[in-house]
Image (cartoon, rainbow, N blue to C red):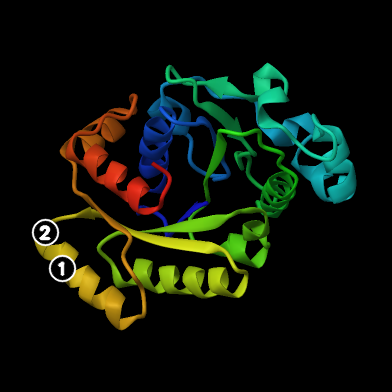
Amino acid sequence: MVCGKGGTGKSALSVLMARLLSDKYKVYLIDSDESNELLPKMLGTSSPRPLAEYLGGKQKIFKIGEINIVKALETASGGIKPGALPEEYVSRSPEGIGLLTIGKVRKLGEGCACPFNFLTKVFLKNLRLDEGEIVLVDTDAGIEHIGRGVEEGSDGVLAVADPTVESLTLAKILKDNCEAGAKDFWLVLNKVTPEISDILKKMAKRMGLEVTGVVRYDPQIFRSSLQGSKLEAGEALNDVKLLLEHMNLL
């Protein structure tokens, strides 16, 4: 799970990680952010139908309950195989990355995103992956998903911190929860210059945080994000590759 406060660059890093990992794995990227819209364009693919629609809409998710959600989505004995879901719920990038969307809040007064967090939790807990498959989750901003227990179904959390003390504070909360739940934890500093990187590393160390990787400010990422086009990256791509190596995923 790729987590952190809003604006840290979770979606961009998720896309770059997915691209690099697609050379080694069959990658699925789950969009569990109920607000953001442009992840499909960043990935270079179309928007899949939300999984919430597969279950009849957001208002029915809690009523259906975990057992029946699993039964509805079950595509393998005792679990859910993302590659076996109907094709309209999984779009594909040029690299073959599968994109799944949990659901989006789009209408005034439709209610909170709690059912989407619940669906993400159930989905992750019941995933059945084949050898060579990997799933990345681009989460919603902040750490509300901790309260919903979404992390229960994950192997680990990558906390993304931008040049703010708030992002490091949330990373510390994520780290403490991962340790309590016996989950892997990594921390990446994103959108930084060398000077700021040194400051953040010292701050992280004082907070008991070990920095796994550093991703430099990359004008190509900002330019393509501003244009709403397929994500482009320069030096940041090399930084993400080093990050994945340090995470023992490459």
Q: Quick check: 237 above or below 146? A: above
Residue shown at 72%/20% (left/top)?
Answer: 86
Residue shown at 27%/34% (left/top)?
Answer: 226
- Residue type highlighted by circle 1: Asp
The residue wearing badge 2 is: 194
Residue 161's x, y, as percent?
34, 61
- Tag 1, which secondary structure? helix
Find out whether the residues at labels 1 and 2 contact each other: C-beta distance under 8 Å: yes
Q: Quick check: 210 above or below 122? A: below
- Locate residue 194 relative to residue 118 in the image: left or right: left
- Residue type highlighted by circle 2: Pro
Residue 112's x, y, as percent?
67, 53
Label 1 to label 2: alpha-carbon separation: 6 Å
Residue 2's x, y, as percent?
47, 51
- Quadrant housing residue 4: bottom left
The residue wearing badge 1 is: 198
